[in-house]
Amino acid sequence: MLTGLFVAAIASASAAVAPPADDYGYVAWCRGMLGQYIDLHSAVLPEVTRIETAYRAPGSSLAADLKVYTDLQTAARRHRLKLDLALWAAEATGQADASARAAAIARGRAAWPTLEAVGARTLAQAWMSWTLPAKCDKIADRLQARAATFARSAPPPRVQVAAAEQPPPARVAFDPISTSRERNPVLDPSLEMGAGPPGSAPVAQLANVVASNSGALDARCRAGNQSSCRVLARERRKSGG
């Protein structure tokens, strides 16, 4: 009888609170109904407590009976998360338009009668006996399964494919005896230090690179670069070589 009162209230409601026909909209509508059930807890609890106190079974515990409603609230919040996950899965895979969610949830919330419309006792009785329609779970499972199937069959995003197709950057080997200024500034101190062409660099500037590339200077000296020969001779005298 109590459930019948609630069903009658929904049946007499306008089409504005009826569930949408599509799976995504229906699950969002269920989510709205469940959310309103959770939010009504504080509003109906005084009347629920009065009802439970007035109709006590011999030897029963009021605290234990009221704890049942607290446990139902915890379970309802977990159930709401399940519905949210199904909705998010459909949105993330492009199976549904997220802009339709808010309106469907609002319709689910509005399916509950208001306190002003039915009174505290009727609303509390409906709340105490209410359960989420079994169809909500079935459609939520179907919605999530469809999204999972789509995710497995969909190609990876193009940006990932393009990144994988990019060739690795070319690596240019360092050639210590190259005479190219562009590739080997160590052999040409004028490039490293902003001086003039080879042969005009001060001996002090050339001496700065001897320790790191004496073999290259030797090659330049043998190739006829007199500045390199002078630096090598000076360094060998200093080192006793």
Image (spheres, helix red, strand yellow):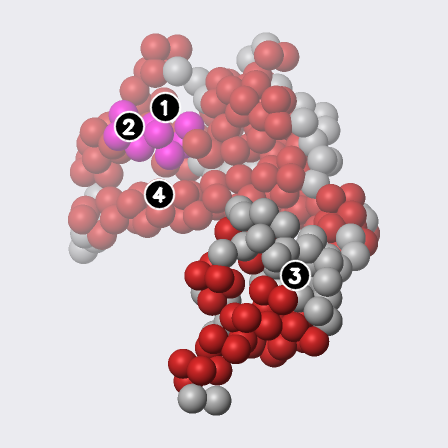
**Mark earlier in primary sequence (1, 3):** 1
Foreground: disc 4 or disc 3? 3
- Percent position of residue 66, x then y: 24, 44
Q: CA distance from mark 2 to mark 4?
A: 13 Å
| Label 1 neighbour load within 10 Å: few <14, some 14-19, many 20+ | many
Q: Amino acid at mark 1?
A: Leu
- Of the numbered discs 4 and 1, the one sitting upstream in the chain is 4
Q: Residues within 10 Å of mark 3 (few under 14, many from 20)?
A: some
Lateral position of residue 89 relative to residue 8, left or right: right
Q: Nearer the viewer, residue 77 or 154?
A: 154
Looking at the rendering, which quadrant does residue 225 occupy? bottom right
Whichever of labels 1 and 2 marks the residue nearer the N terminus, that label is 2
Residue segment shown in magenta: 36-44
Q: Is residue 192 visible?
A: no
Q: Residue at x 54, y 75 (%)?
A: 232
Q: Amino acid at mark 4?
A: Gln
**Of the numbered discs in the image, which one, if any, rests on residue 184?**
3
Q: Which mark is residue 240?
A: none
Q: Are marks 3 and 2 in contact (CB under 8 Å)?
A: no
Element at label 1: helix
Task: Give above or below for 93 relative to 224.
Answer: above
Q: Which mark is residue 44?
A: 2
- The amino acid type, in three-letter code, at marker 3 is Asn
**Which residue was labeled with disc 4?**
73
Sequence-first tag of 3 and 2? 2
Dot 4 falls on a residue whose secondary structure is: helix
Q: Are marks 4 and 1 in contact (CB under 8 Å)?
A: no
Q: Is residue 65 left or right of residue 110?
A: left
The residue pinned by badge 1 equals 123
Task: Say whether residue 139 is left or right of residue 102.
Answer: right
- The amino acid on which the numbered mark 2 sits, given as a three-letter code, is Val
Q: Is residue 38 magenta?
A: yes
